[in-house]
Image (cartoon, rainbow, N blue to C red):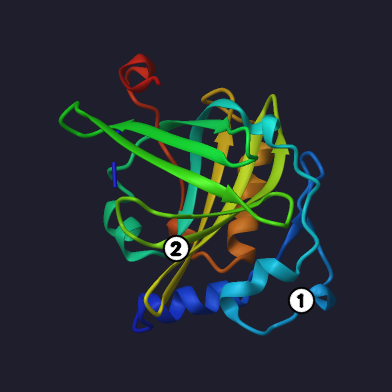
Amino acid sequence: MLCANQSSQDRNTVAVKRLMCFRLKPHRFEPIPAGVFLWRQVRQLSLVCSLIVFVCPQMAGKWYLIGFATNAQWFVSRRDTMKMGTSVFTPTADGDVDISYASLNSDGSCWRLNNLATKTDIPGKFTYTSQRWGSLNDMRFVEVKSDEYALTQTIKSKGSELTVVNKLYGRAADLSNDLLVKFKQFSLDSGVLPENIVFLPKNASDSAFSH
């Protein structure tokens, strides 16, 4: 994606089982007590957590994708070539969120992706099927400070494979070191290997992939 002996599937399943939910507190990721979980199905972890009171318009507009963390094999093989891109979140009248992403390929062409995330009965939780890869995506806005940063976590499923993807967004292309450290710790706590937690380098020109 661009514009050990344990299998990747095993690592991803372990990561999903270790997931923790977090309440909205600017600059502080606070674990919710494990007792709120009902461990029926790994794919339903997020359904039994107390989530943030989320107001969709908070996420509206352009964001830089700064941090990316996952044990997914496609990312492991491409992480060294990935660069910072931009996402635009556009709330709909129905309470859903249109998500568009753009970044530059190594040849200078633009890589774009669009998905419509559908709201659920849980505030801050959305679902969508990837138009490009066909995976089912369970996405949560974990923490949002609308003028500075946002943290999302997505559980992706395709067949029997489950992967966890954490993303850190910024209104500007730079965030404080404290937020970078907290994102790294959040990702470690959700089972992502240290080498798979990446802060994406900037592209040469923001205008080249602006929305």
Q: Name the amino acid type tagged 2.
A: Leu
Q: Which residue is mark 1?
A: 37
Where is residue 79 shown, x and y percent of the image? 33, 50
Where is residue 32 shown, x and y percent of the image? 82, 64
Q: Name the amino acid type tagged 1.
A: Phe
Pick whichever, 67 or 178, lies toward us: 67
> Is residue 125 left or right of 201 when viewed as pictured?
right
> Is residue 74 left or right of 31 when viewed as pictured?
left
Pick whichever, 8 or 51, lies toward us: 51
Residue drawn at 60 percent across, 30 percent down: 175
Residue 192 lies, with reference to residue 90, above or below; the image says below
Label 2, secondary structure: give it. Answer: strand
Which is more foreground, mark 1 or mark 2?
2
Where is residue 132 shown, x and y percent of the image? 30, 51
Q: Quadrant of residue 43?
A: bottom right
Residue drawn at 33 percent across, 32 percent down: 103
Q: CA distance from mark 1 to mark 2?
A: 22 Å
Q: Which residue is mark 2?
A: 136
